[in-house]
Every structure is written in C-alpha cells, then in structure tokens.
Image (cartoon, rainbow, N blue to C red):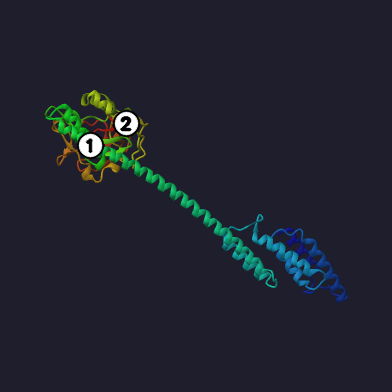
Amino acid sequence: MSTVNREMFEYGSALKMDGQCSPKGVDSQVNYNVFMEDRYNHLVSLIDKAENPEELKELKSGFISLSGYKKSEEFLKEVENKLMGISFHDGGNLYSSTEKNKVTECSEEYENDCNESGDLTRIKQFINAEMDEELIAWKQERRKRIEKKKEKTNTQYQKHKDIIANREERIKDEIKELKKQLNIEKGDTFESKKIQNRISLLECVINGHGQIAFGRYEQGKGNEAILWRFLKTDGTKALFISEKGLDCQRYDSQKKDITWEKCSLRHWLNNEFLNSAFTLDERARIVKTRVTADKNPKFNTDSGEDTMDRVFLLSLNQEEELFDSDADCKCEPTDYVKKLGALFEYGQCWWWLRSPGCVSRYAAYVNGGGSPNYHGSYVNYTFYVVRPALWIDLNL
C-alpha cells in the first residue's frame, strides 16, 4: 500500500464509528464540522505526496465528497490535471503512434473518473492530433527510406546489368574475331585448336552451359583431350568439372580420421595430376583459389580448414547448388578407370566429393544414380572415381 493510500486508510478508520462520521454521545453538527475541516486539511496535505494514478484517484474521490467545502473545487481541478499528466504522458513525452491502444484505454478510464470535467474532449483531441502528426511524420520518413533504398538497389542492379551487358558484348565481339581467324587458319593445326578452344570457352560463358577441351589425360587409348563441363562464372574466372571420371584414387592412403586439407587425394590432384594433364601454358590459366572447408549438411563432422588449390573436388553443398538433378549429376567412366576397377552401375561410376561423411574416416560421394551420399565411405577405398574441378582464367 502506498504512503498516500495508507494515510487515507488510517484516517478513515479513525473516523468510522458504527458507519457514521460522528462519534456517539457528541453533538453531531459540531463533530461533522470538525470532521469536514480535518478531512479537507488532510486531503490538501496529501496532494504533493501523490505520485501515481491510484493515489490521485483516491484524492479525487475525497475532494468530490467535499464538494462545495472551501476550495475543494480548486483542489479537485489540481488533482485532475495532475492525474491527466501522469495518465497520458510517459517521461514528458506523449505515447507514440504505435501505442494508441494504451492511450485509448487511459482515455476511457479517465472519462469514467472525471466525465464531469469539460476539459476531457479538448484533452483527447490534443492527444489524437499529436499522435496523428507523429504517425504522418513516421510514415513520410519510412517512405523516404524505402524510396532511397529502392533507388540504391535499382542503381546497383542497373550498374551490374550494364557490366554484364558490356562484358557479353565484348565476348561476342571477341568470338567474331576468333571465328575470322579460324577461317584464315587452315587445317587441324595447334593454333586452330587453340582458337577453337577459346571460342568454346567464351560460348560457355555466354550461353551458361557447354563443354571445352582442356588438357590431356589417359582415358584408355593413350592421352586424350579432357572434356570439361561448364558450371558457372565468378568475375573473370569460370568453374568447370571433368565430364568423365578420370582416375581411381583413394581419398586418403590410410583408413583414419582425415579432412580434405590433409588427405592424399588433394596432394595427388595438385601435383601428379596437375603436372601430367596440363602444359605450362594451361597451368598458367588455372586459377589458384580458396577452397572452403564446407561442413556436411547432415552431420557435424570436422571438415578441417580452407585450402588454396588449383584442382579440387566439389563439396556436398556445391553438388546440390550446381547440378539441376540427379540425372545431371551422373558421371560416365573412361575405359581407363574401368580397367582400374572403378565401381559403376548402369554405365555410371561412383565419384568422390571433398566433404566428410558421417565420421572423419568417411568421405562423401555421388553414387551411380547421381545421388549424393552424405553418410560416405571409408577414405581408403580404391574403387571410387576422381572427377576433378578447377577454375579457368577467362582473360588468358
């Protein structure tokens, strides 16, 4: 109980006797006058102490009961004004437009308590006007922010669109020039093959799909041109994956906990394979790029640290992102990997991904049906196929 409420309770209890305001056996008129004077003085003394609506409402009821006595009407007005200030203000600031419901509830409560006051309508009109102005200002500011953000987004989009359009125009112009050179260059020469490969590369970028011949590797009939499938571009480089499974290799030479960062297959791809499959000029076109240590989406297996590689395997996340369907993800083995004992079904081989399996001694893979296997297999299995991926510099 607050200080004001407690004092009013104690004062009222002292005066109550058999439900009457005057004690028994005393002149009622004299005691009534004493009671009125004491109650009036007591209520006046509590005005400055009242700090919340409940205390003010108690005071208000008290002054209403003294209606007509001395300056009760003036003090009633003072209490009502103080009550209005606490009810409708929060730290001196009107409630924001988002709190209209609270203000409405306060208005209804205040109206029930002091509907005899002629100031209520004016007070409510003032509050609603203030809130409407605030709401309008907020809406205008929000609209400005949205328009500014939209303008910035449109500018960025148009700039990006212009860059793409300009790049496409440059690529198309380059393709035209290369085709002119190809018509001049007669026969199946090294230079003509180089020009044709460049045209194929640029057409992949323009069309968003296609193949290029890049590098050479044993595929069953000696070293043959490696066909690479286009996956995507990123600035001035393009990502490709071999169209066929090129070799059978263990993910790691030992059956142990391992990550892509430290496995023997990563070392083989960036050394033996890189040096045997590509010429010096071709290796210069292969971009050394950051290969992220993507987690297995279904298992919280340690995936190690990011690496910097020229040749790598796709992760589970990339396999899901870059292939449209399981059928699109199927991989045909070369005759060479068949002789090495590659595991394949219905003419399609099983190929390694770089992501870990359910435990660190397992690595994920794609089966013959083109579906990724998140559980994985032992890293030292010999019959899974290697399907390398690499980024090629478009400017070289």
Q: Is residue 2 above or below residue 276?
A: below
Dot 2: element: helix
Q: Quadrant of residue 266?
A: top left
Q: Are marks 1 and 2 in contact (CB under 8 Å)?
A: no
**Identity of the residue drawn at 33% across and 39% down:** 296
- Nearer-N-terminus badge (1/2): 1
Which image quarter is the C terminus in?
Answer: top left
Q: Type of residue at label 1?
A: Ile
The answer, for residue 361, to whether it is visible in the render is yes
Picture coordinates of residue 54, whole percent (x, y)? 69, 63
Picture coordinates of residue 205, whole percent (x, y)? 26, 39
Q: Is residue 273 above or below residue 2?
A: above
Q: Between 1 and 144, which is closer to the camera in this rendering?
A: 144
Picture coordinates of residue 223, whole percent (x, y)? 15, 27
Q: In the image, which disc is placed on residue 254?
A: none
Which image quarter is the N terminus in?
Answer: bottom right
Dot 1: element: helix
**Identity of the residue drawn at 77% across and 63% down:** 10
Q: In the image, which disc is placed on residue 260?
A: 2
- The local crowd at label 2, few if under 14, some if 14 to 19, many if 20 or more residues have their Cα within 10 Å, is many
Q: Type of residue at label 2?
A: Trp
The answer, for residue 365, to whether it is visible in the render is no
